[in-house]
Amino acid sequence: MASLKKHLSCLFWHFFIIIGIFASAASPTEEATALLTWKASLNTDSQISLSSWVGSSPCNWTGIYCDNTGGVYNISLGSLSLSGTLDELSFSSFPSLQYLTLRNNWLHGSIPSQIGSLSQLTWLDLSYNRLSGAIPSTIGLLKNLTLSVILALPLGLSPAV
């Protein structure tokens, strides 16, 4: 009886650990919605570069790479002539994102402070865009970020105080 109780207790805890893992991860549908919302905010010509972005499964979309659970871990959209802002990109929808490359596009405006919610981010490249304003202090929350290439042409970014 004690062995059965111990076994059930162990099974119970494993069940809650697994539920906790899945509850903390964003669904591919949530990630797809976030990406499609951002795509819709971009200049019409930019949307042509992202024509594969349809449906609710982003893993087969241009520049989107998923891990074995189906979560987006890499957004690599460099040199696609994307024009618009980052304002409509819901950074918090990507809890597993490790790489974000948007270099050499026509992105303008400021870097939203919500970028600090990308807690798993290890690589950030926003170089060669038209970004301006202060670099948000929330960049400091990205403890896994080992290399950050944040440049703008013209050089309009400045560190937040």
Image (cartoon, helix red, strand yellow):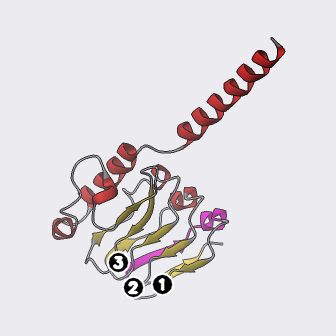
Q: CA distance from mark 1 to mark 3?
A: 14 Å
Tell me which segment is drawn in magenta.
Answer: 128-142
Amino acid type, label 3? Gly
Dot 2 surroundings within 10 Å: few (below 14), some, or many (20 or more)? many
**Label 2 with label 1: CB-CB less than 8 Å:** yes
Q: Position of residue 3 (x, y in %)?
A: 80, 19
> Nearer the N terminus, badge 2 or badge 1?
2
Q: Taking 93 as reference, is 136 left or right? A: right
Q: Nearer the viewer, mark 2 or mark 3?
A: 3
Disc 2 from disc 3: Cα separation: 10 Å
- Residue 54, compared with residue 121, is above or below; it is above
Query: Mark 2: which amino acid?
Result: Tyr
The 10 Å Cα crowd at callout 1, few under 14, some 14 to 19, many 20 or more, is: some
Does residue 154 show up magenta in the picture?
Answer: no
Q: Can you say which quadrant of the picture contains the C terminus?
A: bottom right
Instruction: Indicate the position of residue 23 as horizontal and vertical percent values.
Output: 54, 36
Q: Please give the name of the residue rendered at 53% of the width and 73% of the height, measured from the top-left corner.
A: 123
Residue at point 46%, 49% (across, down): 69
Instruction: Name the residue located 59 percent from the left edge and 40 percent from the top edge.
Output: 21
Label 2: which residue?
128
Q: Secondary structure at mark 1?
A: loop
Q: Which residue matches tag 3?
A: 78
Residue 151 badge: 1
Of 77 and 7, the residue lying toward us: 7
Dividing the image into 4 quarters, which one contains the N terminus? top right
